[in-house]
C-alpha cells in the first residue's frame, strides 16, 4: 500500500511528511512521532501536530532526510546527529577517546558524541578539550605544542595546563581573559585508554566500567589498536553480546558452521547494566589450531554489560585459562563508532601480542560487514519493531534496560 502522511495544524495542512511511504514504514513513522512528542495522545492527530511542528519539526526533518542538526547552544556540538534528549543522557557517561600510548604533548583530534576534541599532555597532565579555538574556531589539533602549550595555527594563541590560554601574540601585554581558555572535559587513564565524559563532574570519581582480572598479577594486559566502524554504537554493542551469530559470521576465526544451536542461558541485572552466562561447546581457539585436547569442553562466556556501550566478555578456556575482552564502543556520532578493546589473559603470555591483535581484528572485521549493513541504523528499543527469538535474551534485555535508563525508543535515530 502506498499512502501519504499529513500533519495538520488546526484545520490547515502544514506539512506533508512523505509522499510515498510503504506500509512497513508506517510503524516507524508512528514511533518517530511518539518519540518526537512524548506525553501526547497519539489518537489526537490535530493537536500533537502543532507541537511537532513547533518543537521537533527540525529534528523530524533530520531523521527523514538523515541530516545533522545545526545547534547554536555553546555547550552542545555545532552539528548534532543525536537528539538533544539522548545527547544529554549519553554525555553523562564515560567513553574511551584515545589509546594512552598514542597521547603525547603534541595534540591529536578526535570526536565524541559529535563534539570535536583535542587531546594533549602537559607533563603528566592529560588535557581533553573542545577542539575549537575560542578566538576564531580553528581546530587546535592542527597546532603544535612548543613545550609551554598547544599553539593555534591561525593567530598563535597558546593553550597550556588545564587548557588555559597563556599567550596572545597580537597583544603580549594584555591580561588574558578567561574567555580565551579552552572548554575542558573530565578525563582519566584506565585500561590503557584515555576515558572522557562531556558532562561528568571533574571532581567526582570517574564512573568507568569494571574490567575483571585486569589488575591481577598473573594476567597480561594488551590494548588492541582502535577500529572505526560506520554504525551506531548500540548496534555494535549488541553484536558483541549476540551468541547466535558465531556459526554464521565467524566460521573463519573461531565459529563452527555445524554448531549453530544456542543453548538457553540467563541474564540478570547489575548495578550499571546486566550480566549473562552463556555455556556452549563453541570454542574460542583460532580455527586450525587443535583444541588442545578439549573436545566437548563446555565453554563459559560471562558477559557484563554497562549501559550504554561497554561490555566485557570473560571466556573460560580449558585448564583454568581465561581471556577478558572489553568492548568499549565510543560513539563519535550517531553513525560512527570507534571501538576500543583492551584484553587481559593468563595464558599464551609469551606469544607475540601482534598475533592477538590480528586475531581480534579479524573477528571485528567479520562483524563489521554485518553491523554496517543493518537497517534501520538506529537501535529500536521498542521491541515490537523487530522480531526476536529466545537466543536474543541478551539483546532484548539490553534494549529494555536502555529504555529504562531513559533513551529514546528509536535510539539514536
Ligand atoms: S583562531 Fe586560534 S588564535 Fe585566532
Ligand atoms: Fe561477532
Image: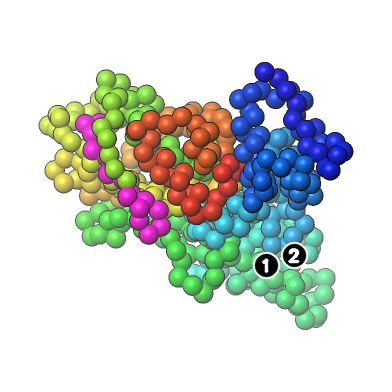
Mark 2, secondary structure of its residue: loop
Task: Where is residue 360? Give x, y as percent.
Answer: 37, 38
Would you identify the image quadrant in which residue 297 lies? top left
Residue drawn at (19%, 45%) of the image: 321
Task: Where is residue 267? Give x, y as percent.
Answer: 32, 46
* Of residues 97 and 328, the one drawn nearer to the viewer in this rendering: 328
Residue drawn at (69%, 55%) of the image: 77
From the image, give the main secondary structure of the stretch colored magenta.
Answer: strand
Task: Where is residue 195? Give x, y as percent.
Answer: 49, 59
Q: Which residue appears farthest toward the right when viewing the image?
A: 12
Residue 134's tag is 2
Does the magenta run of residues contain 278?
Answer: yes
Does the magenta run of residues contain 40?
Answer: no
Would you identify the image quadrant in which residue 336 lies? top right
* Of residues 27 and 292, the one drawn nearer to the viewer in this rendering: 27
Task: Where is residue 15? Give x, y as percent.
Answer: 82, 36
Would you identify the image quadrant in which residue 43 lies? top right
Q: Is residue 313 left or right of residue 98?
A: left
| Cβ at disc 2 under 8 Å from ligand 1 | yes
| Relative to 312, residue 215 above or below | below
Residue 298 in view, yes or no: yes
Residue drawn at (41%, 40%) of the image: 395
Mark 1, secondary structure of its residue: loop
Crowdedness near tag 2: few (<14), some (14–19) or many (≥20) residues, C-alpha within 10 Å: some
| Relative to 208, residue 403 above or below | above
Q: Quadrant of the N terminus?
A: top right
Q: CA distance from mark 1 to mark 2?
A: 7 Å
Residues rendered magenta in the picture: 268-282
Rendering colour mode:
rainbow
Q: Is residue 59 left or right of residue 129?
A: right
Residue drawn at (57%, 57%) of the image: 89
- Badge 1 is on which residue? 182
Amino acid at each position: 500500500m502506498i499512502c501519504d502522511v499529513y500533519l495538520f495544524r488546526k484545520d490547515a495542512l502544514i506539512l506533508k511528511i512523505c509522499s510515498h511511504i510503504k506500509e512497513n514504514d508506517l510503524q516507524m513513522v508512528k514511533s518517530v512521532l511518539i518519540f518526537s512528542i512524548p506525553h501526547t495522545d497519539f489518537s489526537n492527530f490535530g493537536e500533537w501536530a502543532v507541537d511537532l511542528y513547533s518543537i521537533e519539526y527540525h529534528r523530524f526533518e533530520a531523521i527523514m532526510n538523515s541530516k545533522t542538526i545545526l545547534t547554536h547552544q555553546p555547550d552542545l556540538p555545532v552539528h548534532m546527529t543525536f537528539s538533544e534528549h539522548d545527547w544529554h543522557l549519553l554525555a553523562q557517561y564515560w567513553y574511551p577517546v584515545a589509546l594512552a600510548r598514542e597521547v603525547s604533548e603534541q595534540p591529536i583530534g578526535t570526536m565524541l558524541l559529535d563534539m570535536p576534541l583535542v587531546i594533549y599532555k602537559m607533563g603528566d597532565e592529560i588535557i581533553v578539550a573542545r577542539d575549537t579555538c575560542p578566538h576564531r574556531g580553528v581546530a587546535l589539533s592542527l597546532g603544535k605544542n612548543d613545550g609551554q602549550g598547544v599553539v593555534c595555527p591561525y593567530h598563535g594563541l597558546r593553550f597550556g595546563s588545564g587548557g588555559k590560554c597563556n599567550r596572545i601574540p597580537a597583544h603580549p601585554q594584555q591580561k588574558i581573559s578567561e574567555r580565551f581558555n579552552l572548554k575542558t572535559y573530565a578525563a582519566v587513564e584506565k585500561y590503557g585508554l584515555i576515558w572522557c565524559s562531556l558532562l561528568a563532574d571533574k571532581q567526582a570519581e570517574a564512573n568507568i566500567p569494571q574490567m575483571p582480572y585486569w589488575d591481577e598479577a598473573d594476567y597480561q594486559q594488551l590494548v588492541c589498536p582502535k577500529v572505526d566502524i560506520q554504525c551506531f554504537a548500540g548496534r555494535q554493542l549488541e553484536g558483541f553480546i549476540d551468541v547466535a551469530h558465531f556459526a554464521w559470521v565467524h566460521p573463519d576465526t573461531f565459529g563452527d558452521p555445524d554448531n549453530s544451536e544456542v543453548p538457553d542461558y540467563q541474564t540478570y541485572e547489575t548495578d550499571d547494566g546486566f550480566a549473562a552466562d552463556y555455556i556452549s561447546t563453541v570454542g574460542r581457539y583460532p580455527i586450525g589450531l587443535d583444541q588442545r585436547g578439549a573436545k566437548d569442553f563446555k565453554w563459559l562466556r560471562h558477559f557484563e554489560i554497562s549501559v550504554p556501550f561497554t561490555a566485557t566478555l570473560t571466556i573460560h578456556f580449558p585448564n583454568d585459562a581465561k581471556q577478558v575482552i572489553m568492548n568499549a564502543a565510543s560513539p563519535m556520532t550517531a553513525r560512527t563508532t570507534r571501538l576500543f578493546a583492551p584484553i587481559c589473559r593468563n595464558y599464551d603470555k609469551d606469544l607475540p601480542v601482534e598475533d592477538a591483535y590480528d586475531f581480534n581484528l579479524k573477528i571485528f572485521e567479520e562483524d563489521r560487514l554485518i553491523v554496517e549493513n543493518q537497517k534501520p541504523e538506529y537501535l529500536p528499543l521498542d521491541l515490537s519493531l523487530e522480531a526476536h527469538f529466545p537466543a536474543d535474551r541478551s539483546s532484548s534485555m539490553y534494549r529494555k534496560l536502555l529504555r529504562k535508563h531513559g533513551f529514546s525508543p528509536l535510539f539514536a535515530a
